[in-house]
Each structure stands twice: as structure tokens, then as C-alpha cells.
Amino acid sequence: MRVQGRHLRAVDWDARKQAVVWIDQNALPFRFVLRHTRDPEEVARAIETMSVRGAPTIGAAAALGLALVWQHMPAQWEKWKQRFLRTRPTAVNLFHAVAWMDAGFQAREDPVARAMAWLEREVAAHKAIGEHAAALLARAGNRILTHCNAGWLAAVDWGTALAGIYRLHAEGEQVHVWVNETRPRGQGARLTVWELAQEGIAHTLQVDAAAAALMRAGEVDAVIVGADRIARNGDVANKIGTYMLAVLAQAHGIPFYVAAPTSTMDDNCPHGEAIPIEMRAKEELCMVEGVDEEGIVQRVRISQAEHVRNPAFDVTPCALIDAIITEQGIWRPSSSCSR
Amino acid sequence: MRVQGRHLRAVDWDARKQAVVWIDQNALPFRFVLRHTRDPEEVARAIETMSVRGAPTIGAAAALGLALVWQHMPAQWEKWKQRFLRTRPTAVNLFHAVAWMDAGFQAREDPVARAMAWLEREVAAHKAIGEHAAALLARAGNRILTHCNAGWLAAVDWGTALAGIYRLHAEGEQVHVWVNETRPRGQGARLTVWELAQEGIAHTLQVDAAAAALMRAGEVDAVIVGADRIARNGDVANKIGTYMLAVLAQAHGIPFYVAAPTSTMDDNCPHGEAIPIEMRAKEELCMVEGVDEEGIVQRVRISQAEHVRNPAFDVTPCALIDAIITEQGIWRPSSSCSR
């Protein structure tokens, strides 16, 4: 998608520099910073610190990081595979991307070509998701609520939850997006608002807890979110607050959609309770980053709480999901799912 | 209640200084500041800027502010009544407190005695609410979720939602409080955490959107919140996010309680849709205040969103409320309410 009119991906291969390049998502929206590295450890740390984030972007970054390992230190392949697998526990795209690279390594393919094939497959999937999602959303209505950032920053290009919105916008449809700020890290307030503004799509920010009253007021036609892992039965792990939205959507008769590539599906996982949920540090909730009046980034403490519960994700049971939109089409888990 | 072992009220009359004294709730939890004034305009501004906040504390501050008017500029009584009535639109205690002071003014009572009678009536009500709420909560279980701050800071003394928790703690019961941070102003993260820590009550902070998954995990025995205005049919206006919790509590079979003095009831208001909901500035959501590493208060911008929807309150319909706890006892609106 576009940044000030220029086409970019969230993570990519820089052929001239022979390096991984990514948009530093911790710097957005206040600073736009492209980072380059030939050091796979820097890529792994970018995943851990959420400088790259979003399940498909994490998988793509791991694929490119392993291309660097393969080029520069192939003897340490096994060690580095484990290093990347340990970066984040919930997004399954990471595991699939590592397996994809491993198969290429064993078959002695070209490292960069192998990693880029993963990226192209993902981007093509997101474009197809956008087509399927646009058709669903067009029927539901044009006031769409989303949570976290499941746009192109999270998904290399196009996006998952936002892909359908970008598609509708490209087709000339009027769309209005309700953006949940998405505490504690504020991916909605920081990233989704930034993405939608870059594309010129109408949007309004609100606190997460305001979604319920907004639904009751009849202002929401559909909810669409991404996914970090989808179990075999259709249960979905996604950003904390997703399950809240699913319960609220059902209570208000609003369709609830999940958009994700099939690389987010975990066939080894029978249902949501088997998905490991990452618990993150309390500082993530108690400290907030922003810019002061002079535009300088500052971190401030907003709470002195000693005890904090900070799960990064929650699980939405399949029964609450009207459709899971993948590149292969539309799956309606609520009509068939079991637990 | 206690601040470092010393008994204090959220707002009070300082007899020695012949001034209104209040705890500056915008300074907490990083600085503990008592503010004094003999200028009613400063009291009105303290209400508007939320330096005093919480429906019963707002009412008490208005009563004391009008005592200053009565003492120093009785000829301007009508103008100042209107000044205080305009400070915040949703809390009805404010209107009741102004009417109480007006009746005393017309009857030529003593101004400070009249205002203090209002405070004492409120504090006695909150103590009684604590007794009724403790009985209800003891039956529900000891893992209690609350939203915003409906403790003694919001209610002169004792609190409304927290009164029952303080009572149980005083009786030697083990209680654990789940504290929603309560965006955008963070009253849970800043004030409720501070209050509970001062009283030595176990508590854990979480983001608002995490409440749903916590309920699904079976970790919540009851939800209790305060109220800013209660309509005749039992619909309740309270901090944005309250309605979210009520829907979630019902979906998970968890009792949902509202605790408030009868001064929060508005008999002129037939149902929740007639309650005016204050929309606040977008800066409240996009700017966050905290302290830096040196303990200096800083305001930082966390989002560049141009369009923000920032309602201060939402309305919970009576059908979702298992009990409204007042000083007069327990009202079960869900068994009788109509809309």
C-alpha cells in the first residue's frame, strides 16, 4: 500500500543492500522509519519488540531473517530456526514460515527466492481475502468496526481485516471505519488510523469499551478483525478484546467476521483452548509512549499498579464467528463448529 | 477513608481556613495534593476539569462551592446556581445538591451547616450502601470486577461500588478486585488502584477489553459499578464501558450490580434515553498524562487521529442490572423494569 503516495510493504527484501528492510511499527505514527539489517538477530529482536508485528508480517520477517542465516551462516541453521520459533508464541504463521524456509533449505533452493516466494504467496492471499471480504461487507453495510491493526502493516501488503475495506474503497464505495484504539499498545490509535489516513478512508477513533454503546446505538453494520491463530474447529486467537467484540456483536445482531490467510490456520490445534496465549509484561500497560509538544518521543508511567494481568490475545469460540474469510473463500464456522 | 493512615474525605470544609478543601484527583496517583479555595469559581472549575469527580463528590463540591457564594456574594445567588448547574451535564447528584442548597438559602439557614448536612447525608448513605453491598457480594464470591473509580474519591467517603468491598475487608474477608483501567482518563489505573493500595486490598489491573476473556475463564464472581444517573425505570448512566460490562456479565451468567445513593436517582427521567450523555474533547483520548523517569508529570500525544468519538458515559438498560444498591436497600430492576 501507499506511504505518501509511494508503494511499500511492511517487511521486504532490499535487493540493492542485500538486506531485510521493514517499517518500524514502534516508531509510527510519529516517525516513519525504515530499518535495514543483514543480521538475523536484529530481525528476531524486531519481532520480539513488535517493531514488526501482525501474524502474517511476523511470518514474512522470519522467512527473510532465515534467508540471511542461510546466506551467511548455514551451519547454524538449526539453532537459528529455534531462535525464530521462540520470538512470539501465538502467531502460527511464524511456524509455517519457518517450516517453509526449512523445506527450501533442505532442498538447496535459493534463500532469497524461497523467502520472497513466501511473501508473494501471502500478499496474493491478502488480495484474494480483500475480494471475498468486500463482497460480504458490501452486503452488511458501510459502517465497519475493527480492532487492533489487521491492515497492511500487519500483513506485508493489503491487510487481512482491512483488505476488504481497501478493496471497497478502490471500487469507489463510501466506507466509514470505527477504529478501536486497542489498549495496551494502541495499534488501532497508532497504526490503523495512520494506514486509513494514508489511503484517504473515513474513520473515527474510540476507546475499546465504547464499542458496546456504539453497537446499541445502531451505528455498526459489521465487525471485522484479523487472527493470530485459527484452530481446526474455527476458534480464533486474536488481539485481546476480540472476544469482547464477538460477544457484543452477537448480543446486538451484528455480523462478526475474521479475515486471515490460510497460513494462520493450525491444523494441529483442535480448538481454542489448546492455543498458547502470550502474557506480556505489566510495563506494557503501565507505561505509555507518545510525543511531547516538541515532537520528541517520551515514555510516561500512567499507573503505579503492582499487579497487572496483560494477556496479548484472547480466544473467540467458533460459535460467535459468522464468517472466516481466507484466500480460498468464506468459511462459516458458527454453522458447523463443535466443542 | 485513609491516606497514609490519615482519615480524609474527597472534598470537605476546612473550618480553620474557612475554605473548601479537596484532593486534586488529576494529580493522583503521582502527587497527593490538597487544594483549598474561598473562590466558588475555582470550585466550579475543579468540577469541570475533573479535579473533583464522581457523581456524589461533584454534588458535595457544588454544595460547598455554593456555601462560599452564600457567605461572600449572596446577591449573586441565582447566577452562581446556574454556573454550578452547567459544570457537568450527566451527574444528577449535582442538581440535587444545588436544589438542597437553594432550599436552605431561601430558608436563611447557615450556609456551611447546610452544605455539611448534605455531605453527612451522602456519607451515611455510602456507609449503608456498603453494608447492603457486602451482603450481596459475600454471597456472589470474592473475585469482584469494577470499572472506573466508584470509591471514596468519587463519593466523599466510603465509596459507592467500592463501599461493599471496603466493608468486607473491614470484616476480615479476603477480597480480590479486578480493576479495569477505564480509558480514556484511566480512573481505574490511577485512582482505584491507589485507593485499594492505601487500604491494603488485593487487586489486579487490566485493560478494559480484557474483561470479557477474564469472565470466560471463570475468574469473575460479580461486577459492581457506580452510577452517574439512574432513571425512574432503573436504566443507569455510568462511565463509558459500563454497558459493555453489563452485556458481558449477562452472557457469562455473572451478577451485575450498581451501587449509588438515592441522590443519583432522577425521578424526572423516565428511562435511559432521556439522560444527556456528555461528549468530551478528542484530546482526552489522544493525549495521555503520566510521569517520566524523574517523576515529572508529562502529557504526551498517543494518536494523531483527526476524528474521535469520546462519550464520557453510556447507558445500561435496567434489564441487564441484577441489583441497584442504595442506602435504602436493594432494588432489582431487571425483574420489574419496562421499556
Image: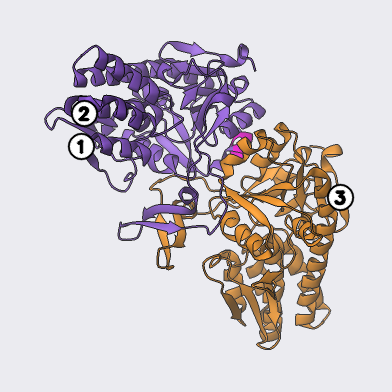
Chain colours: A orange, B purple
Residue type, mark 1 in image: Thr
Which mark is drawn over residue A330? 3
Q: Spatial distance from mark 3 to mark 1, Cα to Cα? A: 64 Å
> Is there one chain holding both mark 2 and mark 1?
yes
Disc 3 to disc 2, how far (Cα)? Answer: 67 Å
Which of A47/A98 is in front? A47
What residue is shown with label 1? B37
| Labels 2 & 1 near each other (Cβ < 8 A) | yes
Please report the residue visible at 37 percent of the width from the left and 15 percent of the height from the top. B128
User: From the viewer's perspective, is residue B181 above or below residue A121?
Assistant: above
On the question of residue A225 being in view, the answer is yes
The mark tally for this picture is 3
Residue A233 visible in the picture: no
Q: Quadrant of the C terminus of chain B?
A: top right
Q: Where is residue B8 in the image (x, y as percent from the top left)?
A: 24, 31
| Mark 2 chain | B
Residue drawn at point x = 19 percent, y = 28 percent: B73
Residue A140 screen position, x and y as percent: 80, 43
Please tell me whether mark 2 sits on a helix, a strand or a loop.
helix
Q: Is residue B53 magenta?
A: no
| B310 relative position to A286: left or right | right
| Disc number lying in front (3 or 1) | 1
Q: Badge 2 is on which residue?
A: B68
- The picture places residue A195, in percent across and down from the top left corner, at 65, 62
First to last magenta residue range: B212-217
